[in-house]
Image (tube, helix red, strand yellow):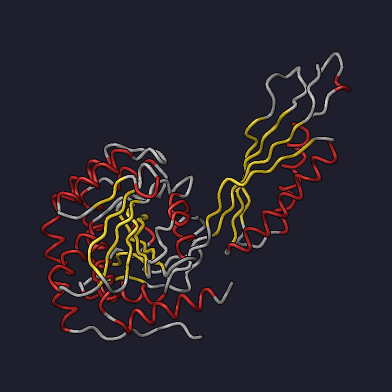
């Protein structure tokens, strides 16, 4: 099956709805700046995004949209939906509701079938909130899912807003615990079984394994626990590791190779071993048809947007990858001015709170809204999206 390279042409209805959504962006600008500032000023960790949750729920309810707070049994998740019949498109809100509000306004004006769903998706960075939402059925009837993610503008030419196409590595995180036997290290060391020796031997074996890795595979880990006192043979040692690969199957295979290193280390030192999987993020399978629709929307607004399908895989991971395995998905990237600071740094966080970054977020949100509305209204585009997704699933 050939992936789509050309999309159905836009209609006059698309133009009218684009005007409606642009006006919606303008009308909601002050509200969303308030939401943005409130969330930026109150940083919160995974599953403790109380301020973000409450602020967004209140903003959506204030627009007359029915919202389910604490959705799917997750305290800081929420679900909002507007429309009836037709296809279902979801926006993952991390935490920006603007594209959803714009599509709601377009649906109100058109009075056509189609549903837009906003899912408040907490805990992306460490635990995988979207995975819990998948397991709870939040995406069971979703036919397309969209979101954006910022990066430094320094990776793009100044006149390019970002890249409609993104791909990331799959990652599997796990914890390994070695259990030995304590003993006094001076009086009777021969009575002990050294769990730290097992951890160090396993750590060294994994370091040797790296020589045989593919260029796009990664292994990273730490010794999280290694004993309590220098004169006591450690009876417990803990390592925490993550392995990354271009595909979910590849990450699982690499994880098995790493675990074999630890199993042999346990056997060599006489220790017992326990392994616990902490979480698995699938690789991101971006739907090319949605990418093209988004790129077309941004360029129709007078801005440049790459759709670089030949780009190198981003050496990072996201739980949006898990979503991309269950429904057609899109995660575009837009650049923000951050003085060459990159995500997960203090400089990038500072840049993310600026007016300039907010304006670029507005542009990306408007492009997503236009592409989303086309998906809901255009059967040809929806069929192309479905074909691309089926092609991706055939690669498993």
Which sits in the foreground, 279 or 264? 279
Residue 333: quadrant of the picture: bottom left
The residue positioned farthest toward the top in the image shown = 187
Q: Measuring from the top left, give residue 381's x and y in whole percent.
A: 33, 81
In the rendered view, would you say 389 is above or below 64? below
Q: Is residue 126 left or right of residue 346?
A: right
Q: Is residue 82 above or below residue 10?
A: above
Q: Position of residue 152 (x, y in %)?
A: 36, 55
Task: Look at 17% across and 69% down and name the residue there.
Answer: 106
- In the depicted view, which residue is nearer to us: 143 or 214? 143
Q: Is residue 337 left or right of residue 247?
A: left
User: In the figure, is residue 366 to the left or right of 212?
Assistant: left
Residue 106, compared with residue 4, is above or below; it is above
Q: Nearer the viewer, residue 357 or 96?
A: 96
For the C terminus, the image quarter is: bottom right
Identity of the residue drawn at 11% across and 64% down: 23
What residue is rendered at 87% in x and 17% in y?
A: 188
* 381 to 369, vertically: above or below: below
Which residue is pictured at 27% across the width and 63% down the height? 364
The image shows residue 173 at horizontal and vertical percentages of 59, 48
């Amino acid at each position: 099956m050939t992936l789509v390279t050309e999309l159905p042409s836009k209609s006059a209805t698309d133009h009218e709805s684009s005007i409606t959504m642009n006006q919606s962006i303008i009308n909601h600008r002050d509200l969303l700046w308030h939401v943005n500032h409130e969330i930026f000023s109150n940083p919160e960790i995974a599953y403790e995004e109380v301020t973000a949750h409450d602020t967004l729920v209140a903003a959506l309810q204030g627009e007359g949209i029915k919202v389910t707070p604490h959705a799917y049994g997750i305290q800081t998740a929420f679900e909002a939906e507007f429309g009836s019949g037709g296809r279902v498109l979801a926006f993952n809100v991390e935490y920006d509701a603007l594209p959803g509000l714009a599509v709601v306004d377009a649906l109100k004006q058109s009075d056509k079938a189609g549903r837009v769903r906003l899912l408040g998706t907490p805990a992306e960075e460490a635990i995988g909130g979207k995975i819990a939402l998948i397991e709870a059925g939040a995406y069971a009837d979703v036919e397309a899912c969209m979101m954006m993610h910022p990066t430094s503008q320094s990776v793009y030419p100044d006149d390019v807003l970002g890249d409609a196409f993104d791909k990331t590595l799959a990652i599997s995180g796990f914890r390994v615990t070695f259990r030995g036997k304590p003993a006094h290290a001076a009086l009777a060391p021969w009575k002990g079984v050294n769990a730290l020796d097992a951890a160090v031997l396993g750590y060294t074996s994994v370091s040797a394994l790296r020589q045989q890795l593919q260029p796009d595979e990664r292994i990273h880990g730490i010794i999280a626990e290694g004993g309590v006192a220098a004169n006591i043979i450690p009876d417990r040692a803990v390592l925490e590791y993550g392995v990354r690969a271009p595909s979910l199957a590849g990450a699982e295979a690499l994880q098995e190779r790493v675990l074999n290193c630890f199993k042999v280390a346990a056997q060599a030192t006489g220790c017992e071993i326990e392994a616990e999987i902490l979480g698995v993020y699938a690789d991101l399978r971006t739907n090319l048809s949605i990418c093209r629709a988004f790129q077309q929307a941004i360029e129709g607004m007078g801005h440049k947007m790459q759709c670089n399908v030949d780009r190198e895989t981003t050496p990072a991971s996201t739980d949006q990858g898990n979503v991309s395995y269950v429904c057609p998905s899109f995660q575009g990237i837009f650049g923000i001015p951050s003085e060459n600071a990159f995500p997960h740094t203090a400089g990038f966080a500072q840049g993310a709170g600026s007016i300039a970054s907010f304006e670029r977020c507005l542009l990306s949100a408007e492009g997503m809204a236009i592409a989303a509305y086309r998906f809901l209204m255009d059967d040809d585009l929806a069929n192309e999206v479905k074909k691309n997704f089926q092609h991706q699933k055939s690669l498993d």
